[in-house]
Image (tube, grey):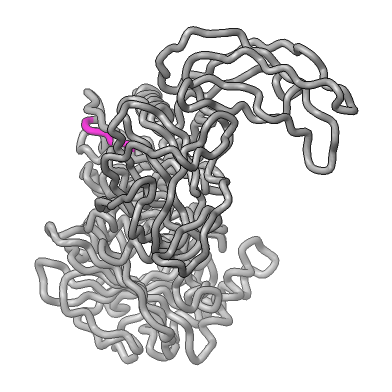
Amino acid sequence: MTTSNFGFYFERSGLGAAQGAISPAQQFFEGSLAEASLVRETGQNSIDARAGEDPVRMVFELSDMATEDIPGIQGLREHISQVEQQTRGAQGHAGMSTAHQTAGRDRVPVLRISDYGTNGLTGSESINEPESPLSALTRGAGISSDDGSRGGSFGIGSAVGPMASDMSTVLYTSMPIDDPEVVLAGYSSLASHRDSSGTWRTGDGFLTDLGIPDDFRYLRNPASLGPFSQRTEPGTDSYILGYRNAELDPDLQHIKIAALRNFLLAIHRGTLVVEGITNGGSWRLDTETLADHVKDDPEAAAFYRAINDPNPITKTSTRLGKITLYIDVDDSLEKTLHTITTRAPLMRISTFRHTSIPMKYAAVLECSDPKGNQLLRALEPPQHNTWDAARAANGKALLDELKSFVREGLRSRIKQQVGDQVEIKGLSRYLPVELLEDPTTGKTGTGTPFAGAGTTRESSTVQGAEQTPIPATPGTRKTVRVTVRTSASDAGEKTTKKGKDRGGPGTRKSKGGGMPGSGQPGEGKSRINAGDVRFRSWSDTGASDIYLALTPTEDINGDLELVALGPGGRSEDDYQLPIASSTITTNGKASPLTHKGNTLTDMSLSANVTSQVRISLSSNHRYRLGIK
């Protein structure tokens, strides 16, 4: 590309500090989370520059570009060559060597990140306007607006471009909302070096008019860069030259997963749309397609179910304004995903871990109220990946309030979906058997002892002190004293003695749903059997409702026949459940179900998606259920 006098300018070093081949700003975004950092920082900048009420649209486009189409490439190659030679033997030389090799190729992969529905880079590039958006992004460090609605705080997000470039170079084109002209800028992050004439130069190179010795002037209305289309509406494009992960992620699936994990709530709310375009195809994340794309990532899927919580927990805080907690309890999770936090940009910030919560869950805390957003923004480091209480005088009080809100919210959900946990100290030494609950009395017995596969030794029995039935309370662990009544003999000649029934509500630790299926597929309507789904049931302690969580391994349609489980977990096939009505909720959308007797008819379940069924009963009783 011919651009007259435009090229990369590296200022004389003078008596300034020398720059090494490792940029301190870039180190915030290096490592295994590089792609997440790239998506987070560019996404945050785009959301900050929103121009109106319409969604911000981000497009990640990967394509090859002829190196000769890079503005100022000849002069840039000379500087990179000098840096490569002069950093040999120094830390960071590997990166400069890669930049030298990449700049010498005929073609390089380029990732263009474009945003639409934004203000673009307004203001002037002049040295007299260092805080304008155009100057701040293209050559600023530590410069950021103090507008409390912004997500950025440190003005170093632009470092992710060179970080993701094997040439350590990024180009920008932007059309500001108040000017129809498109401006072209560029930045190269190298190291201090002597140029070909022996003059010491800084490591920062800026694409500007080389004919102006005392100010910056960027090119206006440039031709299209390589295969990429020209910008025709307000917004900004970042061109990452020699995108380092082009071969590892040719379809930009890693970029998509990073967008799902970090901007899930923004996409769900319709404030952000993210697209990917490659030679192999394209994808789009928006409110309509999100439910399908989260299936590609179990973590994103779990938090997506959480933000579709039909009954989120809310509170109005004096200091933080409105805060909301969304929770999804799911026994099928490999592990608890804890609580991710967000504020006004609806970007993932921190993770709260409450290890005392005895259930597998994924939760999302939202604090997007203007009051809370400004306070929490002050607690974030440059990566915007945590809330650090030490960064502000009131930081500890703010975080304590949020963590207490989350903890109590999780405990209240335990009461609703799990019930009280019964903790019997020392039981594991004597009785490796689950305590089974009689759903009609709320009392537990020992059930059938079991000593493990391939053994004949029975377990000992225990006796618990009798209790008067009491209401369940949220998040309470009850401790029951136990004594060994009679040790079982090795030969099994002595019968085990049943312990006294223990009153009061409690929940067994077995998950239920392990009943073998019956019937043959294809006989009449299709039947959903026990082996087709992961299943869990629980009762709402405040109403005569039963909840089911159903997660199939593949898409399935059919009838689901339920069976009440009596004492010892035995199925009571002839017992008619008093079902009054039922609904199914999948991905936040609730639909009524029909039933016939104990059978829920014409159900439709999606693979690896947990659906919640709510069954209202005509009598105020609690039941444990299985699948017949």
Q: Residue at x 26, y 45 (%)?
A: 344
Inspect the magenta stretch and tell me whether residue 2 lies in it. Answer: no
Name the residue at the right extreme: 491
Judge by depth and name the residue closer to the eye, 433 or 441: 441
Q: Is residue 403 visible?
A: no
- Up the image or down, 526 lies above or below 550; here it is below
Q: Is residue 240 left or right of residue 46?
A: right
Q: Residue at x 21, y 37 (%)?
A: 369
Quadrant in the picture for residue 117? bottom left
Give x and y (percent) for residue 518.
53, 55
Highlighted range, magenta: 321-325
Judge by depth and name the residue closer to the eye, 295 or 225: 295
Q: Residue at x 83, y 20 (%)?
A: 494
Give x and y (percent) for residue 317.
24, 26
Quarter placement of the N terminus: bottom left
Q: Is residue 49 left or right of residue 512?
A: left
- Up the image or down, 292 lies above or below 465; here it is below
